[in-house]
Image (cartoon, rainbow, N blue to C red):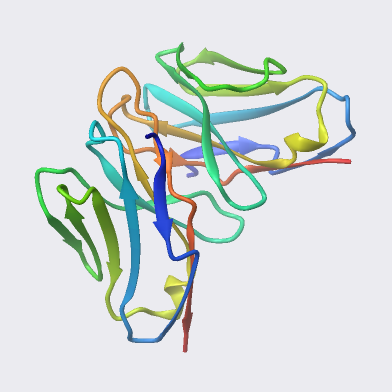
Amino acid sequence: DTAVSQTPKYLVTQMGNDKSIKCEQNLGHDTMYWYKQDSKKFLKIMFSYNNKELIINETVPNRFSPKSPDKAHLNLHINSLELGDSAVYFCASSQDKNQPQHFGDGTRLSIL
Amino acid sequence: QQQVKQSPQSLIVQKGGISIINCAYENTAFDYFPWYQQFPGKGPALLIAIRPDVSEKKEGRFTISFNKSAKQFSLHIMDSQPGDSATYFCAASSSGATNKLIFGTGTLLAVQP
């Protein structure tokens, strides 16, 4: 069973569209994260939720909005997509905010 | 001060050799230093991690060496195998209100048969 699963795996869309990426973890973890990996493979934290409460909100355009309906899910909604949003987005989870993080396999977002 | 500097950017090692990747940090509040391994098309997977109360941690062929005074830590892969070919990331974080991992820039390791 996949511990941290993201859907879709690939997302190709046009500039200006709105899209969502979903993440689910079956590890019973309390904390979930979104990371962005750019074309040079640099990984940067975007958001983190602990028990559905937002605890990390990095300098990210407000076109990006995370939503955590429950502890096992953390979705990422992106409005008005721009070319620079093309990247691989990774979801991760940890037992609590001081425990090792487990990553999903990523969603590759390509903006045409 | 939040940066973690990683070197080299890429590394080619012969099968059976030792792979060494180095990282340096500035923030003395960092107290957790994991290494992640990433294969193409996959997410980063935790390989090994260390806290600053020890200077070395070994798990199988993988060893982390930690130098608190120099604010440096390194990953050693002994008896490197072609299956170890991947991108390796060091990272650092500090305990507290958040667990924000600051990643290094990655090292692409190629182990030649």
In the foreground, B55 or B79:
B55
Q: Position of residue A32 (x, y in %)?
A: 45, 26
Residue at the spot 22% in from the left edge and 36% down from the top edge: B31
Question: How many discs mark residues in the rendered view?
Answer: 0
Q: Is residue A38 left or right of residue A43?
A: right
Q: Quadrant of residue A93?
A: top left
In this rendering, would B27 be left or right of B13?
A: left
At horizontal 40% and vertical 23% (from top left) the residue drawn is: A31
Of residues A85 and A107, which is closer to you in this image? A85
Query: Relative to A105, is A94 on the left or the right?
Result: left
Q: Residue at x 39, y 29 (%)?
A: B100
Residue drawn at the location 39% of the way across and 36% of the way down:
B101
Question: Does B63 appear above or below A12?
Answer: below
Residue B41 % position (x, y): 61, 56
Image quarter of the C terminus of chain A: top right
Q: Against A34, is B64 above or below?
A: below
Q: Is residue A76 left or right of residue B33?
A: right
Corner quadrant of residue A21: top right
